[in-house]
Image (tube, coloured by chain):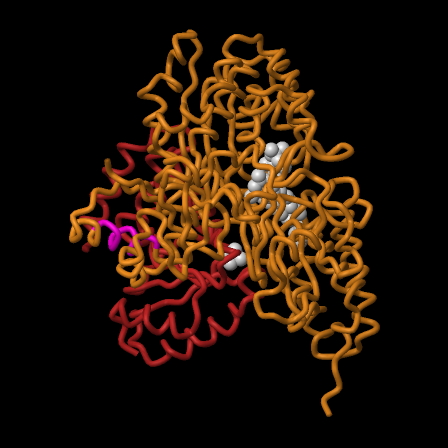
């Protein structure tokens, strides 16, 4: 997607959302959903629409772990690293994932930590997009990345 | 007549392949020319059995689990549609001891009904509490909630009725009801299971709160890690509104209440109530100084009730069956029930709603069946990442707010994370500091700087550098965080750290390599 079409989709999100009370978070969510990230050069556009300073918008984007300002990898795997998953070997799973994906192409797959997916009785757990996986063993992980078509 | 089959649509079941099971059941039924009606219910909370498939028979619901997609053909061969014998068969669901031994008040319907069927909800006592509330004066509703003894289930255990009373008595042009569905604690999933398994109950509880204090707008702030909860809540709100349970004229009472779901963005601290309000206003989730209380100046500066999902979802039964009915459960000043969440290294993890007073040992062994690994259980963290680690000597204390305070521990949101003897408590203490450093909102120094220094100190302790002096430094740092932080993020991180140090000191002494 090019810059012009970014500006356009952001403009349409802004015009439909900007009058909601507390509009900034819903707007950032919509932008990230549409484009995969929040382009840094869109901060001015967002700030103007909401009558905020650029610093305020930047501050919000960087405060929340969920928002990103760079395009995501083709796949993102979020592995839970919180206590319940740790008790069932999350650390080993992360190690395994890193090893398995070490050989993959740059930008192919990113592994990110998350802190609890609410699957703590069936841990360790991970999330790909909105798809959840629980009781993830290294073998199950390997099957998953194979199904996702990730070349390692 | 078609046969009713239940395959949960709860996130935990989905994460274990429930969609494939559902798909295969429909395909196999079609292939065999059998008429089935598939319901995507909530989870019964026996999570080690998920996906738990149930079939409606004339004797009651019969359960099979954990079912994988590949088991479906064999289940049909075994005539599971009529409760036939199969190695995954568990018998009548209601007779399973794990469920039978519970006291399900708030979770009475979860797993039983179709979460988005209004008909089902009404057939199972749904909206009875709201109907009673509509016939009452606001102050009388507040009084019922106060009399029930309900205390906030989000962690701080503040009496819900008293909070509501402040909002009722504060005059304003606009008041708000905010539901805290940020559920960030590791080891907790009760809010999620309730929102996915019985969303109308939360809608009903929030509407009653609105009637009680005179609010007309509500928000449910759900963490972004719960996409399925968000979808289900949005659908439930639309259904309820269409049927007149929400909107400009609730059940022709002339009262109005609108409800909207807002999505968090992955910040743990946004579960803290004032940080959450900042976030709802579209700002960074920086904790506000109190006073003013949110009940007086909350969302957009207006009087606001902010309550946890389970607090709000416990209100309808209180209105329906009366304060005394609810208060009869529990012990001391801990009235009613708490949905405990048994998680981590445990054989039979899941949701156990019990009256206060049950012990950790009962939950972990009578319900949980011991560790998942089969190794001895070493430490249990109760109450999320800011909760203490409890050693075996404390497992027989009744789970009660005051009894836990006396142990220098907390019940929090009822999460219980079990660790076996392979756990290294020094590493877990370091993690607690690290988590605080990552999630600190940055408003106050003891937490923002203290947690980072805490990680460094823990690194030295783990490396065995100058242990005695470093442990002393750690205690000093914890003292500063405990007494100098503005909110419980920095103020309670010392709970896991110091409880680990005090109860498991050997983990803090570097093992000399042989
Ligand atoms: C760091 C931090 C995180 C919190 N996270 C949550 C949460 O995820 N859910 C919740 O209901 N309360 C959470 N709380 C407690 C809230 O501040 C507040 O006490 C609660 O929402 C009040 O509702 P209740 O009275 O119904 O419990 C958190 C508190 C702190 C300090
Ligand atoms: S204790 Fe931490 S999270 Fe709480 S206000 Fe201070 S810096 Fe923010
Ligand atoms: S701790 Fe990993 S899902 Fe909750
Ligand atoms: S500037 Fe305030 S603590 Fe450093």
Closer-to-camera residue (B373/B454): B373
Q: Is residue B177 magenta?
A: no
Label the red chain with its letter: A
Q: Is residue B287 visible?
A: no
Closer-to-camera residue (B203/B485): B203
Picture coordinates of residue B409, whole percent (x, y): 75, 50
Dividing the image into 4 quarters, which one contains the N terminus of chain B? top left
| Secondary structure that dominates the magenta span | helix
Closer-to-camera residue (A106/B72): B72
Image-based side of B441 in relation to A45, left or right: right
Picture coordinates of residue B269, whole percent (x, y): 57, 46
Q: How many marks?
A: 0
Question: Which residue appears farthest toward the bottom when viewing the image?
Answer: B514
The picture quadrant where one finds residue B212 is: top right
Closer-to-camera residue (B26/B290): B26
Q: Is residue B206 above or below residue A73?
A: above
Q: Is residue B307 above or below residue B28?
A: above
- Chain B, colour shown: orange
Picture coordinates of residue B351, whole percent (x, y): 55, 47
Image-based side of B382 in relation to B215, left or right: right
Q: Residue at x 50, y 61 (%)?
A: A123
The picture quadrant where one finds residue A111 is: bottom left
Q: Residue at x 64, y 41 (%)?
A: B155
Dividing the image into 4 quarters, which one contains the C terminus of chain B? bottom right
Q: Is residue B391 visible?
A: yes
Q: Is residue B24 magenta?
A: yes
Picture coordinates of residue A59, whole percent (x, y): 47, 47
Q: Residue at x 61, y 70 (%)?
A: B374
Q: Which residues are magenta?
A: B18-26
């Amino acid at each position: 997607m090019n810059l012009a079409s970014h500006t356009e989709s952001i403009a349409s999100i802004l015009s439909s959302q900007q009058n909601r009370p507390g509009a900034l978070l819903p707007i950032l969510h919509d932008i990230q959903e549409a484009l995969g990230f929040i382009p840094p050069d869109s901060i001015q556009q967002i700030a103007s629409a909401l009558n905020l300073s650029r610093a305020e918008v930047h501050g919000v984007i960087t405060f929340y772990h969920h928002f990103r300002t760079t395009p995501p990898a083709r796949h993102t795997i979020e592995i839970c690293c919180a206590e319940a998953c740790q008790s069932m070997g999350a650390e080993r799973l992360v190690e395994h994932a890193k090893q398995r994906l070490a050989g993959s192409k740059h930008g192919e797959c990113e592994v990110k930590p998350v802190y609890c997916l609410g699957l703590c009785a069936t841990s360790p757990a991970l999330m790909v997009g909105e798809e959840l996986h629980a009781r993830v063993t290294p073998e199950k992980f390997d099957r998953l990345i194979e199904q996702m078509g990730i070349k390692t | 007549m078609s046969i009713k089959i239940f395959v949960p649509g709860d996130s935990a079941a989905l994460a274990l392949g429930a969609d494939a099971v559902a798909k295969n059941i429909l395909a196999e039924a079609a292939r065999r020319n059998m008429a089935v009606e598939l319901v995507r219910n909530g989870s019964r909370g026996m999570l080690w059995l998920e996906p738990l498939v149930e079939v409606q028979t004339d004797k009651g619901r019969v359960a099979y689990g954990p079912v994988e997609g590949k088991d479906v053909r064999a289940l049909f061969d075994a005539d599971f549609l009529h409760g036939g014998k199969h190695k995954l068969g568990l018998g009548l669901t209601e007779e399973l001891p794990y469920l039978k031994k519970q006291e399900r008040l708030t979770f009475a319907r979860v797993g039983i009904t179709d979460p988005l069927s209004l008909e089902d909800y009404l057939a199972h006592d749904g909206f009875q509490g709201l109907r009673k509330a509509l016939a009452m004066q606001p102050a009388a509703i507040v009084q019922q909630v106060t009399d029930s003894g309900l205390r906030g289930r989000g962690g701080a255990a503040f009496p819900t009725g008293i909070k509501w009373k402040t909002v009722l008595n504060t005059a304003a042009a606009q008041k708000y009801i905010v539901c805290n569905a940020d559920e960030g604690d590791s080891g907790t999933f009760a809010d999620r299971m309730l929102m996915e398994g019985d969303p109308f109950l939360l809608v009903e509880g929030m509407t009653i709160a609105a009637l009680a204090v005179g609010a007309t707008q509500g928000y449910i702030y759900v963490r972004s890690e719960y996409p399925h909860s968000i979808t289900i809540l949005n659908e439930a709100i639309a259904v309820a509104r269409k049927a007149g349970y929400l909107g400009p004229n609730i059940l022709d009472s002339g009262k109005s209440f609108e409800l909207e779901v807002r999505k968090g963005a992955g910040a743990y601290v946004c579960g803290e109530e004032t940080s959450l309000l900042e976030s709802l206003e579209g700002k960074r989730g920086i904790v506000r100084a109190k006073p003013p209380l949110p009940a007086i100046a909350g969302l957009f500066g207006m009087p606001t009730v902010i309550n946890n999902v389970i607090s709000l979802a416990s209100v309808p039964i209180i209105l329906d069956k009366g304060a005394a009915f609810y208060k009869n459960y529990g012990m001391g000043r801990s009235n009613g029930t708490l949905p405990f969440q048994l998680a981590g290294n445990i054989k039979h993890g899941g949701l156990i709603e019990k009256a206060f007073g049950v012990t950790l040992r009962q939950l972990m062994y009578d319900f949980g069946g011991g560790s998942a690994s089969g190794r001895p259980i070493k430490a249990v963290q109760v109450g999320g990442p800011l909760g203490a680690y409890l050693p075996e000597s404390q497992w027989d204390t009744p789970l009660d707010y005051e009894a836990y305070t006396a142990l220098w521990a907390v019940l929090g949101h009822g999460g219980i994370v079990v660790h076996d003897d392979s756990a290294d408590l020094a590493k877990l203490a370091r993690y607690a500091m690290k988590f605080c450093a990552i999630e600190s909102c940055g408003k106050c120094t003891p937490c923002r700087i203290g947690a980072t220094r805490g990680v460094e100190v823990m690194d030295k302790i783990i490396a065995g550098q100058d242990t005695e002096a470093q442990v002393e430094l750690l205690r000093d740092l914890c003292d500063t965080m405990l007494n100098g932080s503005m909110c419980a993020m920095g103020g309670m991180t010392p709970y896991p750290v110091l409880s680990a140090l005090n109860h498991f000191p050997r983990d803090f002494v570097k093992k000399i390599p042989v």
